[in-house]
Amino acid sequence: MVCESTVVVRTYECDHYGHVNNAHYLHYLEYARYEFLKSVGFDYPGAIKAGYGVYVARIEIDYKKSAVVDDVLTIRSWPLKKGAVSGIIAQEIKRGAEVIVEAQVTWAFVGPSGQPTRIPDPWNVPGLTPEEV
């Protein structure tokens, strides 16, 4: 399951070199992960209301090319790995066919105490698990 989201680069996201500041790519990736979770049927607002959360534990990011104002960027997100408590979502940001950023985001499901916990059934949706070939 690959989820695609789109953003358009805004002027305030660019630095004095004229390209997107590296920190803004994290915002793009976060937005796209939320869209991914919605697309696989993960009730994020419901999880938060019940006292749970999905925390980012690690982000590996490779910057390949620069994006500039008015570029239309497509962010692709898909599950790479899933365990009982955590997983990895792969993401890439593209401008047309050109890859701008590649990332892997390790996440952990966290209980009301703030500690990692097994994912309860209502949030353990099949779309979090990579499809087997």
Image (cartoon, grey):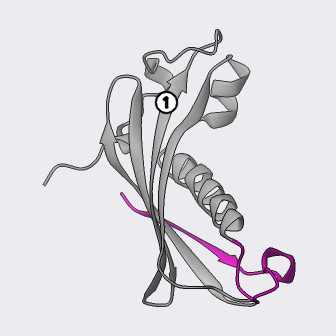
In the picture, which quadrant includes the C terminus? bottom left
Please provide the residue range marked out in magenta.
1-21
- Residue depicted at x 47% and y 47%: 40
Q: Nearer the viewer, residue 125 or 69?
A: 69
Q: Which residue is disc 1 drawn over?
A: 108
Q: Mark 1: give few (<14), some (14-19) or many (20+) Cα within 10 Å.
A: many
**Residue lying farthest to the left in this orientation:** 133
Residue 64, given in percent of the width and then of the height, sits at 47, 79
- Residue depicted at x 51% and y 26%: 109
Residue 125, compared with residue 100, is above or below; it is above
In the image, is 99 to the left or to the right of 22?
Answer: left
In the image, is 27 to the left or to the right of 103?
Answer: right
Q: Nearer the viewer, residue 34 or 104?
A: 104
Residue 106, compared with residue 62, is above or below; it is above
Q: Is residue 7 visible?
A: yes
Residue 84, given in percent of the width and then of the height, sits at 34, 23
**Residue lying farthest to the right in this orientation:** 12
